[in-house]
Amino acid sequence: MRQEKIRFDIEEQKIIKLRTVMKKTIQLDPRTKIAILILVNIIVLSPLDFGLEVLLTGLISLTMLYAGKPADAAKCVIQYTAILLLYMLVLKLPGMLAATFSVLFVVARKMFPVLMCAKILLYSRAGELIEGMQKIHITKKIVIALTIVLRFFPTIKEEFSCIREAMKIRGIALNVKNVLLHPAATTQYILVPMIQRLSVVSEELSAAAIARGIDSETKRTSYYQVRFGAQDALFLCLYLLLAVIIWLKRLGVI
Amino acid sequence: MIRMEDVGFSYESDKSGCLHGIDLYIPKGQCLLLTGVSGCGKTTVTRLINGLAPGFYEGRLTGSVKISGKDVQEWSSHELSGIVGSVFQNPRSQFFNVDTTSEIAFGCENIGLSRREIQDRVKKAAYDLNINQLLDRSIFSLSGGEKQMIAVACVYALNPDVYVLDEPSANLDSRAIENLAGVIRMLKNQGKTIVIAEHRLYYLKGIADRIVYIRDGKVLHDWMEPEFLALSHEERKEMGLRAYCLDLNMFYNNVGRHTEKANALEIKKLTAWYTRGQRVLEQIDFDAKKGEIIAIIGDNGQGKTTFAKCVCGLMKEKHGQLMLYNEELPYKKRAGRIYLVMQESGYQLFTESVESELHISFCKRSISPEEQTRDVKLLKDLQLNNKMQRHPLSLSGGEKQRLAVAAGILQDSQVMFFDEPTSGLDYQNMEQVSTLLQSLRDEGKTIFIITHDYEFLLSACDRVLKIENGMVADNYYITEKTVPKVQAFFQVATLIKGGISI
């Protein structure tokens, strides 16, 4: 019981903390988050000078802070700094090596802000995301598909750890040595049970969804209410401003 | 409420589970328990009521299934979901959302209720089912029992007149089953019509009004509860049914087996922590003898699984030592030497045929004739010899389990762990598992079984290890004197007195 209780208490505290933070700041509308994600995608795809890139990451960290996740924000800042430092280090390497490795780090640098935005989007509850998408009239089929995708990541994680354990017991452990020496066999041993499990889950899930009226013709409603407020306008403006600066710079105006 | 007239159904792709000439009238407010051996068609009956067959599971339907006087096929799917609520077997695959509150609201959103109404209903469902503490949590952090409660809440929020439950207890532990029983009793008191397809019957004693026994797709018996209670245990076993009443000593059969004195496995001061630094196992000392079947019991979250994982080499302990036949077995060498048969043995099978499954490895090597004869004999012992070329994943649940055991035997594992080997099994299959375990014991294997199955435990195990709070809370051989201890853990006495209440 004790351990159960400790776990429970921790969860409880987390919930209380979350609720107080949420009361203090009004959460961003999931639509705003989607807009930010798209905008950041466009921004990182265009050529970007170093200062602006740092500024962008800073802005996203700020958004994370606003979303009430200081720990995540700190973690991201540290990780990003680490990537930058490594990048600079790699540039010091002789010719060819520098060229090959620096490409890797450039990609990592570009991807990082996008991943941060995705993380922010996932802070919203599934129900809120659905309502946000419903409000901008995305068709139900796409909304449902996206909900299932969200749900499948943790499922895959769970299934994967089970398969890993099973492989270990059967004497075909998943480790670096085996992956390098027998890539084909390892892939097979992971994929066969994984695909089988996922197909079972998806069939049962579809049945459960139909029994709960997912294919009804009536317009879906929502438990959650999403509102576009001042805070959304503010953050959107900040991101737009940054985008405009970047584009003006590119066109040579500034 | 529900009327089936001369109903027949056959699946397009599957031969088992077909129905012929079912006539069944279920009045409003009745709690009906459908039972029968695996593949008899009881799940199909539930699917006809909630419209999943032939709506989702395709097949040919004859006769008529009417709910409230209207044919199921004529109800539109969302109308039907407001009238018939379904809870399924596997708590893991019923969820659409990642968080609990969104999930409970999900059905109501689909049928287009107003926001105000949905919020009220979610609140009411959480209150009535006593799961307020589960709101706003990630579903992936919940235990199986908690997940099943959320699944019930999701249906409860829709407030249907009919509840259809398909083996709802299959993946639950004994405490969670008690909760489930309490909830079903509450639904019954609200005057709901309830149809439950189940193998595990005891928890419905005093709740079910009527028991329908299905064999080969036909209704063979239709009892009211008192008539069913009057059946003898022999008659029940004959029909392949699990116990309905858990009488005091009925399952216990001691044939005086603990003769071996040699210690097979010695566990010394085993202590394990989670990554967060919480202690989950504390100084576990335990000796297991050669040829013993040991049941590991304890509530969820008390350390049973962690114990199994440590001993099987899936999780590293903080301190402690493991000796297998007087030879120290460090963490890295454990996996495989100590074997684990998982609850879903399908996870443990990786190749394309039963035959090749036995010799899985990264390096291809030829199999000698001696090995081949040994394989054939082993598979014959496990009744798998006519399935050598089959794909392992096309086997039935019990066959997969036996194949996983065969692989363990060939790996020369002396100690085997089984995780809930009888969950969701009917009487015959449970007996088969017992027989398998006896034969493994006779070969001198030491067997540990994590189980919540009282009937199985008493009929198959020699010894009980109870883990509580990460420590050995109790450790005894099953004799006439100690049977009451087992009963106390499973709260059999309260069950016998007549049902469970929350």
Image (cartoon, helix red, strand yellow):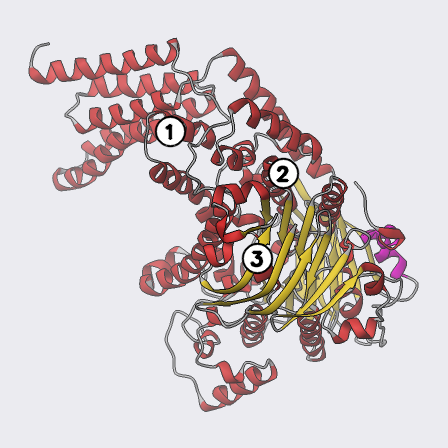
Give the residue pinned by disc 3.
Answer: B65
Residue shown at 48% from the left, 31% from the top: B112
Mark 2 closeness class: few <14, some 14–19, many ≥20 residues within 10 Å: many
Vertical position of residue B171 compared to residue B217: above or below:
above
Query: In the rendered structure, which segment of residues is drawn in magenta?
Result: B482-494
Q: Position of residue B125 (x, y in %)?
A: 65, 33
Residue shown at 50% from the left, 61% from the top: B347
Report how far apart the C-alphas of labels 3 and 1 lie in the structure.
Answer: 36 Å
What amino acid is at disc 1? Gln
- How would you classify the magenta stretch by its main secondary structure? helix
Q: Position of residue B231 (x, y in %)?
A: 84, 69
Task: Label 1, secondary structure: give it.
Answer: helix
Mark found first going from the N terminus, 3 or 2 = 3
Camera-nearest residue between A105 and A196:
A196
Q: Is residue B484 magenta?
A: yes
Q: Position of residue B121 (x, y in %)?
A: 61, 29
Looking at the rendered image, the quarter that the C terminus of chain B falls into is top right
What amino acid is at disc 3? Val
Residue B419 shown left or right of residue B390 in the figure? right
Q: Does residue B135 appear in this view?
A: yes
Q: Is residue B40 magenta?
A: no
Q: Which mark is residue B156?
A: 2
Give the residue pinned by disc 1.
Answer: A134
Disc 3 to disc 2: CB gap under 8 Å: no
